[in-house]
Amino acid sequence: MALDVATGKLLVQWNITVAAQRLERPGSTVKPFVLVELLRSGKVQPEQRLACHRPLYIDGHRMDCTHSPAVASLNASDAIAYSCNTYFSSMALRMNAVELGEVFQRAGFTSPTGLASGEAVGRITAPQSQSDLQLQALGDWGIEVTPLELLLAYRALALEKLRLQNSASKEERNSNPNFVNPVFQGLERSVLYGVARAAQPTGTSAAGKTGTASGVSKPGSHGFFVGYSPADKPEIVLLVYLEHGRGMDAAAVAAPVFTSYWKLWHGDRK
């Protein structure tokens, strides 16, 4: 599924019924929204670093990070780029269950998008323990969303990126950084060299996030990639959902779509 960032118009779709009605755990695609709230509320400082430890067990669930062990200490942007479960499960404990639920509601994960008829609506379960809260912040427990809800949530991030680009000069932005900037930096670095690097297009740039989670009602895992391009001035927001696979597999599907869009609309410009 792909949307025009500025207008919200659906540009391309495949299996829109699945996108509108399938409820799945979103995995790590929710991490940017959790981090925005942690930064906004001052519970986390952007350059504060946290050591990544393996193995990581949360209430019997093994949630080891997939990034290289050489990435041993991460700040906010690094945590997005490398999708560090240790970072997010630790920082999530600075929030309570109500705050985390409100993060997901504001992101639109319990609301229809209006992009299709007969939409399902996401479900959020209130955590009853610290472990529940940690797993929910990782998108692996107590939250189910439709692909369309996830797509629209990332369109909102892309619109905020455009708003910040248009509202101030480069000097003003640098002297008065916005709390969302570390999230944008992390999403761009994720595609440049992080967990979503398979989504890197040719001829342009992109920013985005992968997510892998176990199915609610079926065995195995499913994968998401969701992001926007170009990274600096988003024009298109794209979601790839694989019923069977991993987030990195979905990212690999996204790369040629971003590339084709850029060639179609910008390839003949000098």
Image (cartoon, rainbow, N blue to C red):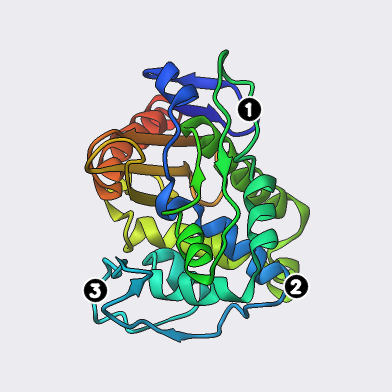
Q: Residues within 10 Å of mark 2 (few under 14, many from 20)?
A: few
Taking the image as shown, residue 106 lies to the left or right of residue 144, namely right
Q: Residue at x 59, y 45 (%)?
A: 158
Please give the name of the residue rendered at 51% of the width and 30% of the height, measured from the top-left corner.
148
Q: Quadrant of residue 175?
A: bottom right
Report the Cα–Cα distance between label 2 and label 3: 33 Å
Q: Earlier in the sequence, mark 2 or mark 3?
A: 3
Between disc 2 and disc 1, the foreground one is 1
x, y percentage for residue 86?
40, 75
| Three-letter residue code for mark 1 | Pro
CB within 8 Å, label 1 to label 3:
no
Residue ID for mark 1: 112
Estimate the x, y position of residue 255 in percent, counting from the top left. 31, 40
- Return the x and y of residue 122 as percentages of the image width and height: 56, 36
Count neighbours of disc 3 (C-alpha within 10 A) and say few if under 14, some if 14 to 19, many if 20 or more.
few
Q: Which residue is mark 2?
A: 176
Nearest to the observer: residue 109 or residue 81: 109
Q: Residue furthest top?
A: 117
Where is 210 relative to 63, above or below? above
The one nearer the camera, 101 or 1, is: 101
Kindly identify the residue that appears in the image at 32 percent across and 73 percent down: 57
x 56%, y 21%: residue: 119
Residue type indicated by callout 2 = Asn
- 10 Å crowding of disc 1: few (<14), some (14-19), many (20+): some
| Secondary-structure class at tag 2 | loop
Residue 122 visible in the displayed image: yes
| Numbered mark located on residue 148 in the image | none
List the residue tagged with mark 3. 68
Q: Which image quadrant: the N terminus? A: top left
Spatial CA span between label 2 and label 1: 35 Å
Q: Position of residue 238 (x, y in %)?
A: 45, 35
